[in-house]
Amino acid sequence: MTATADVDRLVDKANELLDKADQILEGPTKSVSKKTTEIVVVLDRSGSMSSMKSDMEGGFNRFIEEQQKESGEAFVTLIQFDTEYETVYSRRPLPEVPSLVLTPRGGTALLDATGRAVCHALDTIPSDHLCVFLIITDGGENSSREFKRDQVKSLTKKCTAKRDWQFVYLGANQDAFAEGGHLGVLRGVSANYSADNCSAAMDFAASNVRAYRLSANSDDLEWKAEQREEMERE
């Protein structure tokens, strides 16, 4: 298969996923239950993540431990991506989530990972559950071949409008407001973090997500000024 044919095949597959997502979202809007939360983590494992491998593993594990302190049912989906995409586990009950193992490699196919993760979630997550996506990367898009920016942005915005799904963005070594905006993530829930301080970023994310699970108020997911200051500190 030629390179061009391979790309065409991937684009066709992405279009199929988007068509299915549109069909799902055309259904009636249901009221959201506050009893069950779906946490979808879309985590960059590209080669540049090597410098923060240990900190990210520890930060993710503390994130899960913090969620386990909160009452209420929750499920976790973990997507890891580089040039390739992997669903590590889907809708794992919170008490059964294992420790993170991060193996950095490859490039940053952020658009493909986000697009595919949202399509997967639409296909697997009950429409009346609270749902928050946590997208974590240390670099901008450089490897996607399936999804385009406008497709991903349209998809996330539809999910927020139709299902009240929330999207949070954490980006290092970039303009997180611009990169998150390309994915349809609002400025209030997009944040820069220093590669030397990803532990603090994950701890603040844990606190905000836990508060959101308790309140079902999306304002609780917004980054506070003091959180931004600490996360950006070199």
Image: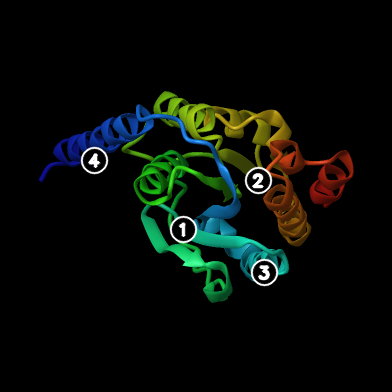
Badge 4 or badge 3: first in the primary sequence = 4
> What is the basis of the colouring in this image?
rainbow
Rendered position, 126 above or below 14: below
Whole-Å distance between the Cαs marked 3 and 1? 22 Å
Instruction: Tell me which label, 3 or 2, sits earlier in the chain.
Output: 3
Q: Residues within 10 Å of mark 3 (few under 14, many from 20)?
A: some
The answer to whether 58 appears left or right of 135 in the picture is right
Is 16 rendered above or below residue 62?
A: above
Answer yes or no: do the residues labelled 3 and 1 have beta carbons within 8 Å?
no
Which residue was labeled with disc 1?
A: 80
> Which three-letter amino acid code belongs to the residue tagged 1?
Gln
Looking at the rendered structure, the kind of residue marked 3 is: Gln
Amino acid type, callout 2 = Leu
Task: Name the residue carrying label 2.
Answer: 170
Name the mark on residue 68: 3
Image quarter for residue 100? bottom right
Query: Between residues 105 and 136, which one lies in front from this camera angle?
Result: 136
Mark 2 or mark 4, earlier in chain = 4
Nearer the observer: mark 3 or 1; the answer is 3
Q: SS at mark 1?
A: strand
Q: Which residue bears the numbered disc 4?
A: 10
